[in-house]
Image (tube, grey):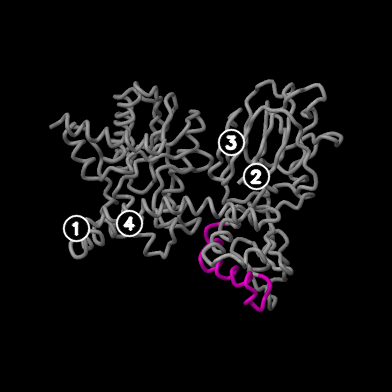
Amino acid sequence: MLRFYHVMFLHSVIQTIRRHKLLTPGERILVGVSGGADSVALAWALRELAATWRLRLVIAHLNHGIRGAAAQADAGFVRKLARRWKLPVALGRANVPLLARRHSLSLEMAGRKARYDFFARVARRHRCAAIATAHTADDQAETILLNLARGAGAAGLAGIPYSGSHGGWRVIRPLRDVDRKSIERFLRQRRLAWREDSTNADPAFLRNRVRHEILPVLAQRLNPGIRSALLRSSEILAGENEWLATLTERLLAECRESATRLNAGRLKQLPVAARRRVLRRWLEAGNLTAKARGFDAIERLDCLVQGCRSSRTVTLPGGWRVCRDGSKLALEDVGSRAPRYKRGSARGGPAFGRKREACPAWREGVDSSVRPFSVRVAVPGQTRLAGQGLRITARIGPGIVKERGLTIGALPARASLSLRAWRKRPLTARSWRPGDRMRPLGLKGSKKLQDIFTDGKLPLGLRHRLPIIECGGEIIWIPGFRIAHGWAVRPDERAALQLVVEP
């Protein structure tokens, strides 16, 4: 019986990994381990596969600063587990209650943010290729019900994806097809210990109420196989949503005239479902927050497209607005240009009297909702920047691309770079950092990227999403702008490094 559970559990994990291409042999993987049953089972499974698949594992554990001595004991348990399995371990600590208050988040959302931010830092330090988390089939069923209660669309009802991204790092979920009961049964048979988190039974957390109250009632009164039914629906919706996302990119490309302008006339001819998806993807490409892309905001924009609003401007959360001028929609970042009113004035009141300097994000020129990223570019090959919704294609081939009349950030963008200048050194696509400079081809000396963005009228929200191409510590290309001095293809070069950045 022991052998049976061992084989069945491992077989399910391997099938999930292969079906969804979650791992590549030879990779270094960061494994998030809380000490609970799910994460212990995940670490054990990947350790079993490590020798055959040449995987190198790093264990990471974050103390959320909520459960005092119990949380300290969890960290000690994970440290001992890593030591017994001879795996490197990184332990961290965060004050999640303070983070929740500071950012007006629930404890669950603040914990998730702290956890993934910590994982990303550790993954960068250890040069991991991916972050593995222990989400299970039960987590998936609970997430679908939660999203349904919030009125989510197809993407939300598809639930937790098998793979995603955070801060430029690939996040994989090899246990997505395994239910919690099977995991605990397997651990008991293997005599593997785990830690129980007391907060998992606390009804103050919404997910716990779904887990311990709502799903059992649905199983008893509606459908004994409710979990399987929810998982089946999510699989259907995930496939359809992936297909619709491809169609949306094509429709957006047909309607988009630049990174910040849409042709409302073309958009108006599309069915309402297509209009909603195109508008949402357009705002997402501009790196607007989830609140700014919510259902109500999209409906107001759709009315603007159809001309059924008396106003020709829609204001969105986060300091953005969309204006209609004739048949064009323009997305504008008005936060930095917001008018200042005197304290106590009829229009402004106290809230409008604040200075820009009061917010560090303005002072640093940083959109605090965007996480920095840095990704190695495959040459030749395709590199996906999932967090930015972009793809970089690199190849070596003849010809010189000289695009004219483009604006910074307008995609797709193409460039041809000298092979002699490249010399097969690593290429990196990364986010802009304050203080970055470049030596643009055709201009004397260097210039701050901040000045280049300002001159090119690139919205603040796009500045931290646009990939900057770097080689040997030098910025060599900004998509939609010039390449760097010294990187032009020479007349005697028969081939060039051809780069394309596109949605």
At mark 4, the secondary structure is: helix
Number of marks in picture: 4
Task: Determine the CA span between mark 3 and mark 4.
Answer: 33 Å
Front tag of 3 and 1:
1
Say what amino acid the circle numbered 2 marks.
Leu
Say what amino acid the circle numbered 3 marks.
Ser
Outermost residue to the left: 1
Q: On the picture, is 188 further left or further right than 319?
A: left
Q: Give residue 374's mark.
A: 3
Are the two marked residues, 2 and 3, in contact with CB atoms closer than 8 angstroms?
Answer: no
Above or below, 255 against 39 in this view is: below
Of the two numbered discs 4 and 2 on the same chain, state the one appearing first in sequence. 4
Residue 447 can be seen, yes or no: yes
Are the two marked residues, 4 and 2, in contact with CB atoms closer than 8 angstroms?
Answer: no
At mark 2, the secondary structure is: loop
Residue 335 can be seen, yes or no: no
Closer-to-camera residue (15/72) = 15
Task: Determine the CA span between mark 4 and mark 2.
Answer: 35 Å
